[in-house]
Image (spheres, rainbow, N blue to C red):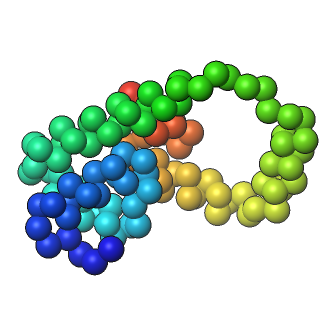
Amino acid sequence: MDAPVNHSDYEELAAGFALCALEPDEEQAFQRHLEGCPACKASMREFEEVTASLAFATPVVEPPASLRAAVARTTRRLPRAASRRRARTRARRHGRTALHPAGRPRP
């Protein structure tokens, strides 16, 4: 997305922000705008409530054992320091702890 130019551009970013799905430049622009915009703050809170409810919208299903093994194989290939750094960076951006899921109440 190009740099936001008007208020409707920021309104479009609210859902992406609540889902932690914005590019870093979009996220920074939205955060700056959010500081002085009660309408976007309210909109973002609504999106966060919806995304939080999605986590409980389906029944809990036990994943197959093969999934655990596949995830373990994949994560062993990742450099540990880099993955921790990404988690901390994302958490700081959203005011959450590193393993705090999107949409949960902030500490």
42 and 93: which is toward the camera: 42
- The quarter holding residue 99 reads top right
In this rendering, does residue 92 appear at all?
no
Quadrant where the image shows the C terminus: top left
- The quarter holding residue 103 reads top left
41 and 98: which is toward the camera: 41
Question: Is 78 left or right of 11, judged from the image as shown?
Answer: right
2 and 59: which is toward the camera: 59
Q: Does residue 14 sit above or below 67 in this rendering?
A: below
**Residue drawn 33% across the image and 61% down it:** 27
In this rendering, does residue 54 appear at all?
yes
- The quarter holding residue 62 reads top right
81 and 83: which is toward the camera: 83
Q: Does residue 96 sit above or below 36 in this rendering?
A: above
Q: Position of residue 32 (x, y in %)?
A: 19, 59
Q: Position of residue 85 (x, y in %)?
A: 57, 58
Question: Is 19 left or right of 38, judged from the image as shown?
Answer: right
The extreme front residue here reads 58
**Residue drawn 89% across the image and 35% down it:** 65
Question: Is 95 left or right of 88, judged from the image as shown?
Answer: left
Q: Position of residue 91 (x, y in %)?
A: 46, 47
**Residue drawn 33% across the image and 74% down it:** 1
